[in-house]
Amino acid sequence: MQAQIYPLERVVIEGKEIFLGMEKENVEKLLGQGQQNNSQSYYFESELRIDYDAKACVQFIEFLGGAGNALLKPTIYG
């Protein structure tokens, strides 16, 4: 599944846009609850991690999957 990265702005996964600063509630409407760990949520078999700040807004988005059989295929700059 393709994931397009727009640095310092957002990621788009299958047409679902996750913006930096977006409220956790809105992320969960798009992606579901995910696996929770403190102020972090994991999605797509832990290939994507979203960190939230003290106000429960997206602070950081990280792709954790490796090459090969990864579910997510992130691209940047087209």
Image: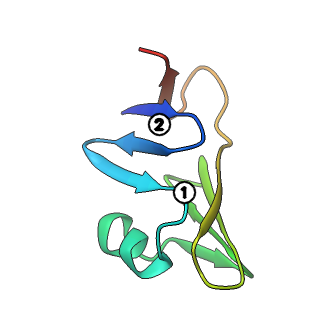
* Nearer to us in this view, 53 or 39: 53
> Is disc 2 placed on a helix, strand or loop?
loop
Q: Are marks 2 and 1 in contact (CB under 8 Å)?
A: no
Task: Name the residue nearer the viewer: 59 or 45.
Answer: 59
What residue is disc 1 on? 20
Dot placed on the residue nearer the N-terminal end, 2 or 1: 1
Q: Secondary structure at mark 1?
A: loop
Image position of 1 with respect to 10: above or below: above
Residue 32 location in percent, x, y?
37, 72
Residue at mark 2: 71
Residue pictured at 48% horizontal, 27% vertical: 73
Residue 20 in the image: state x and y as whole percent.
54, 57
Residue 63 disc label: none
Dot 1, how many residues are within 10 Å of its Cα: few (below 14), some (14-19), or many (20+)?
some
Q: Nearer the viewer, mark 2 or mark 1?
A: 1
Of 64 and 29, nearer the camera is 29
Say if 19 sits above or below 3 in the image: below
- For residue 11, above or below residue 45: above
The image quadrant where one finds the N terminus is: top left
Tell me the kind of residue under disc 2. Answer: Leu
Q: CA distance from mark 2 to mark 1?
A: 22 Å
**Residue type at the position of mark 1:** Leu
